[in-house]
Image (tube, rainbow, N blue to C red):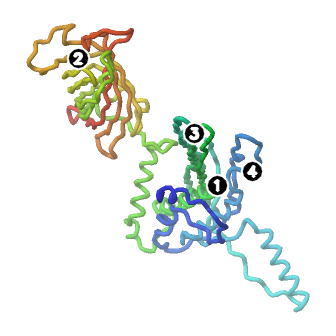
Amino acid sequence: MSGCISTFKHPIQPQPARLGEFSDVYKKGLSRLPTPKEKIYAAVYSFRDQTGQYKLSESVSNWSTAVTQGATSVLLQSLEESGWFNTIEREGLSNLLNERRIIRQTQQQYKGNGTNLSPLLYAGIIIEGGIIAYESNIRTGGVGARYFGTGASGEYREDQVTIYLRAVSTSSGSILKTVHSSKTLLSQKLDMGVFRYVSLKRLLEAETGYTYNEPSFVAVQAAIDKAVLALIIEGIQDNLWALSDSEDVNSEIFSEYFKEKEEASKTDYLGNITLESQKNFSLGLGFSPSLYDGDLGEGKLQSGGTLELGFFRKKPFQLILNTNVGKAASRNEFDSYVASTSLLFHYDVFRNLSSTPYFRFGYGMLYQDAENLFDTKPEMNENIFQYLQLGMGYQWKVKNKPFYIKMGVDSQIFLNDDFDDFSYGNYSDRLWYFSLGFEYRFNLSKKQ
């Protein structure tokens, strides 16, 4: 109950006004920047929404824009809060000039001559750019289950906004530096409900749920803060502006930024790390309990282990030599030790990503004995059986290590129905394996 309460946080009364929040990029990045040798005078004329994207609606026409039209104000605050820029008003320049003209006219009317106003500041650089992309539904999904009128379901959706920012020299017109950043927006929906008869004339109906939509303004603010942070750090690297203390270039925020930039070059639009495999071989070890599926009643889950040797890991299709040892049993009469060896074709769906689903298929042979695997002379069609193996699963790469964590399910479909020494029905016996383990990838020589 307490877990549900802390998750839903249903508002039960109006909330008071509060100060605007800052993005995580500001808290962890901009606010930690060292001080500049001299602040930069910067002007922003316009930082517009260039996407032309309207807010997504599945039921009615919606003419509201997907992102804020006031991004200039967000950028000006980000530049100011960084502590590196003296921002100059240019978006409302006509209003400023009109006000200065009114001041002069008023002074001339009441004093006879106008007092000279201080000159307007001019900018060393102009900040240009805009919100150049807003992509809806780059990733969607959900899960749900319902049984006898009781169940729950959840859905999610991800959008993405992209910012480009450039610094232009006012003395020469040359573009000094261009950077860009992006931010995803997450929307989630969760609902649970009950609808069933608890007796002949009594119907129970209950439901609850919540929806979370990350505001597009928050995403735009974070992306702009990230772009400003990148502009400052890369400008320091290119000697466009300087730190008050040159030793600050060795501070943690700089190393974190360049590490993130290096990873960004290997990251796709979904945020997945893409790496070309440099290993040709793999060795895997795992725990793989088996479940009998045959003619002698319901199967029991039995413990077992698996050992795998992989070849041609740099290729789309790889070869896997798989060995399983364990037991197979039903809840009635069948109970036997089993050992199997398979040659499998293995295919990773996203070969260059750090995590990916996989599929595999192949052929193998299984040896079974009810007493002891090593005391009986194997004879074909009596205790050695041929099968086709189909499998699927998911694997995750341990960060910066040649290790993978793997989880999957495989089915061994025998070519005859004699595995349990009892033939019944139109389908052959099967064994199911549920595996959880790890895999180490390597090369045989340093030259490779």
Of badges 4 and 3, the one in the foreground is 3
Considering only vertical position in the picture, is 18 above or below 386? Answer: below
* Quarter occupied by the C terminus: top left
Residue 23: image location, x then y, percent: 55, 63
Of badges 1 and 2, the one in the foreground is 2
- Camera-side residue: 444 or 327? 327
Kind of residue at badge 2: Leu
Residue 64's disc number:
4
Write down the residue under mark 3.
199
Of badges 4 and 2, the one in the foreground is 2
Earlier residue among tags 3 and 2? 3
Earlier residue among tags 4 and 2? 4
* Residue at (54, 41) in percent of width and height: 153
Kind of residue at badge 1: Gly
Cα gap from disc 4 to disc 1, whole angstroms: 22 Å
Residue 90: image location, x then y, percent: 72, 67
Write down the residue under mark 1.
129
Earlier residue among tags 1 and 3? 1
Residue 394's disc number:
none
Residue pushed farthest front? Answer: 200
Considering only vertical position in the picture, is 48 above or below 80? Answer: above
- Asked if disc 4 and disc 2 are in contact, CB closer than 8 Å, the reply is no
Residue 366's disc number:
2
Earlier residue among tags 4 and 1? 4
Residue pushed farthest left? Answer: 375
